[in-house]
Image (cartoon, grey):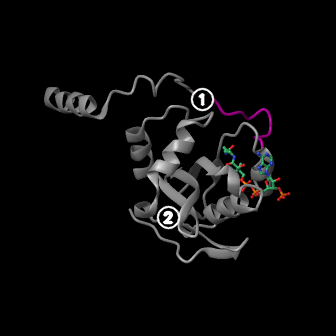
Amino acid sequence: MTHSIFPCSRQAHGARYEIDTDAARLDLAVIHRFLAASHWASGIPLPVLERAIARSLAFGLYRDGNQVGFARVVTDYATFAYLADVFVLPEERGKGLGRWLVETILAHPELQGLRRWLLGTRDAQGLYERCGFRVPAPPFAFMERLDVGAYERTPPARRRQRLLGAARVSY
Ligand SMILES: CC(C)(COP(=O)(O)OP(=O)(O)OC[C@H]1O[C@@H](n2cnc3c(N)ncnc32)[C@H](O)[C@@H]1OP(=O)(O)O)[C@@H](O)C(=O)NCCC(=O)NCCS
């Protein structure tokens, strides 16, 4: 599915900033470099990231055409959405871009009427609170099933293809 919410741009700090959902425009090298070094997606292999992006609604943030931020949404487009991998490159932080990115995502026409948005964050609660997110009220709590070593065990793409092929034959 291809989505586009052009135009979403603004002029600020002597530059033109844009947000869109054009997957072909994403600079995977920039996104992978940031996420592979992040605390939540540390070491994510490029093929895994590519697959995640291909199956999400991904948003790029650009300064004069260059990727300076990113986020993606995992959703059923009906009831629920998970906001993931939000970042603004360090040199562009503190200019309101993170908030603009999150608010633009929340306003996307195909993401309206959802009952629940979720996200996980270690220290950016302030940003998300400004965008309407709250810590779930007790006694409600979320649970997770986390495999911290998953990315180290990801087989190289070629081997994975063979494994998938073998699995298809045997079923
Ligand atoms: C979190 C992040 C996306 C914020 O981007 P940004 O462009 O600097 O944010 P903004 O300038 O739009 O800030 C918007 C508001 O959120 C607040 N805010 C921003 N980052 C914050 C943080 N880490 N903790 C608490 N509040 C934060 C700002 O103080 C600002 O408040 P204001 O509206 O009262 O001025 C950016 O710092 C980042 O990429 N961090 C590293 C990656 C990360 O932690 N991502 C979140 C993972 S869920």
Q: Is 138 placed left or right of 157 in the picture?
A: right
Q: Nearer the viewer, residue 164 or 110?
A: 164
Q: Check the picture and name the quadrant holding the C terminus.
A: top left
Would residue 77 be seen by someone viewing this image from the given angle?
A: no
Query: Residue 129 at what x, y percent from top left?
Result: 79, 51
Secondary structure mostly seen in magenta is loop
Residue under pointer 1? 144
User: Which stretch is magenta?
Assistant: 135-144
* Helix, strand or loop for disc 1: loop
Would residue 70 be seen by someone viewing this image from the given angle?
A: yes
Q: Check the picture and name the quadrant holding the N terminus.
A: bottom left
The residue sitting at the left extreme is 169
Which quarter of the picture shows residue 91? bottom right
Specify the label residue 134 is tagged with: none
Residue at x 23% of width, y 27% of height:
163
Q: Measured along the vertical axis of the image, is residue 50 above or below residue 60? A: above
Residue under pointer 2? 21
Which quarter of the picture shows residue 119? top right
Q: Amino acid at mark 1?
A: Glu
Q: Amino acid at mark 2?
A: Thr
* Helix, strand or loop for disc 2: loop
Label 1 environment density (alpha carbons within 10 Å; few <14, some 14–19, many ≥20): few
Label 2 environment density (alpha carbons within 10 Å; few <14, some 14–19, many ≥20): many
Q: Nearer the viewer, residue 97 or 21?
A: 97
Q: Is 102 placed left or right of 1 in the picture?
A: right
